[in-house]
Image (cartoon, grey):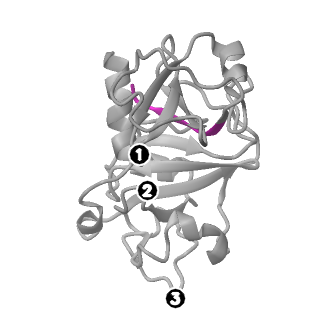
Amino acid sequence: MRHALAIVALMSALGCERTSGAKDDVMREPVPSDTTRVAANTPSAPTTGGWPADQSAYQLGNLDSLRLKVPSCGAAAIPFTVDSVGPLHPGQALGQVAARCPHGLAMWDWGDEGIPSPVLLVRFGTMTVRIALEDTLSTSHVTSLLSVDSTARTREGVGPGSTVAALKRAYGALRYVEGECTVLATLPRTPGISFRLDLLKDFKCGSLEGDGDSHWRAPAGAKVREMFVYAP
């Protein structure tokens, strides 16, 4: 149950992943702009501390329309593990992330609750990883690492686009946790990585709220929408 509560707490921040004071925090002691290079840093996209000042225009939902390229942090494909994605891991300071991936694309994630929080996007091979942060200070920590790309995979070969049946074949029993009308498939034996499911009409909001031990089970054909690594 402790693991389930930790997941619910993370989801309320994920999406969920919001920082209530993000808009004010970027005004104090920001990361130097030459530490985290921002592709959006152009005359039409003024920045504050390395992040675009226009939080509405430079949000994740506008990434394609802005035609911004996600910088590479490595040419090789790397797997998601229970505690990291290559050189990145939850709990890492932004300054450490910038040292390993100095060309991250800084954006804002408004999430489901409409509260902007800072994220960095980097690419490993053809896989884009979203690095969620507490704040824009160099000492701010990574809260999660997320990908929605079909090329993102764990060492067991599952990821976005995989079915619940494939998750069960790879990991055995799953635990389902709900938060904000979103269901995650979690791994009771290996906390640290979770899979957000795309259930469409197969789920009624509130069926699992706060109860990771419910008898509810996801349809075997339901697919993973995104996966993320977090600090359990």
Give the amino acid at mark 1.
Leu
Say above or below: 175 vs 150: above
Tag 2 residue: 111
Tag 3 residue: 44
**In front here: 41 or 173?**
173
In the rendered image, residue 83 lying in the magenta stretch gets the answer no
Say above or below: 182 vs 69: above
Range of residues picked out in magenta? 224-232
Give the amino acid at mark 2.
Gly
Say above or below: 158 vs 99: above
Residue 84 image-quadrant placement: top right
C-alpha span from label 1 to label 2:
7 Å
Q: Residue at x 43, y 56 (%)?
A: 111
| SS of the residue under disc 3 | loop
Asked whether the viewer can see residue 181, the reply is yes
Q: Nearer the viewer, mark 3 or mark 1?
A: 1
| SS of the residue under disc 1 | helix
Q: Earlier in the sequence, mark 1 or mark 2?
A: 1
Tag 1 residue: 14
Q: Residue at x 50, y 31 (%)?
A: 184
Q: Nearer the viewer, mark 3 or mark 2?
A: 2
